[in-house]
Amino acid sequence: MNSKPIPKNVFIRVWAGLLVLLALTWGLAQLDLGRLNAIAALTIAVAKMLLVLLYFMHLRFSTRLTLIFAAAGFIWLLIMVDLTLSDYLTRGQVPGNPLDSWKHGIWPATPEP
């Protein structure tokens, strides 16, 4: 583990990088790139996440054990997102208006015509 304090200019540069990525995210939201919008936005979000994890949470200069636990937390998050999406994406279509698919558990049940 590195016992030296991290220089203040490193944090200022990371903060400036986060601001640049924020401006890039905003600029991307103003453009219509079709399917590339989601890919570009997620790429920028991952870059911002890595900057925050590595520098503001001090994972860049931490021990391997800390890195293992941070990775385990991230893997657990991926598992939770996977379980949520597997539930949501495998639900059947609601008869009638497809825009009302969020009304699965409505009570009392309305009779079918």
Image: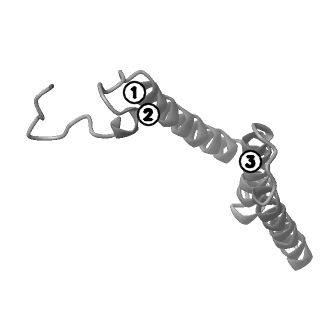
Which residue is denoted by mark 3 in the rendering? 46
Choose between 36 and 49: the one closer to the eye.
Answer: 36
Task: Measure the alpha-carbon separation of dots 2 and 3.
Answer: 20 Å
- Mark 3: secondary structure: helix
Name the residue: 58% across, 34% down.
75
CB of mark 2 within 8 Å of CB of mark 1? yes
Which residue is denoted by mark 2 in the rendering? 84
The quarter of the picture where the N terminus appears is bottom right
Q: Mark 2 Cα within 10 Å, few/some/many (few <14, many 20+)?
A: few
- Mark 1: secondary structure: helix
- Mark 2: secondary structure: helix
Name the residue: 79% across, 49% down.
32
Q: Amino acid at mark 3?
A: Val
The quarter of the picture where the C terminus appears is top left
* Residue 96 rendering spot, x and y as whole percentages: 30, 28
Which residue is denoted by mark 1 in the rendering? 87
Label 1 or label 3, whichever comes before in sequence order:
3
Q: In this rendering, is residue 73 above or below 6?
A: above
From the viewer's perspective, tell me whether residue 86 is left or right of residue 56: left
Q: Amino acid at mark 2?
A: Thr
What number of labels is visible?
A: 3
From the viewer's perspective, tell me whether residue 65 is left or right of residue 13: left
Q: In this rendering, is residue 16 above or below 2?
A: below
CB of mark 1 within 8 Å of CB of mark 3? no
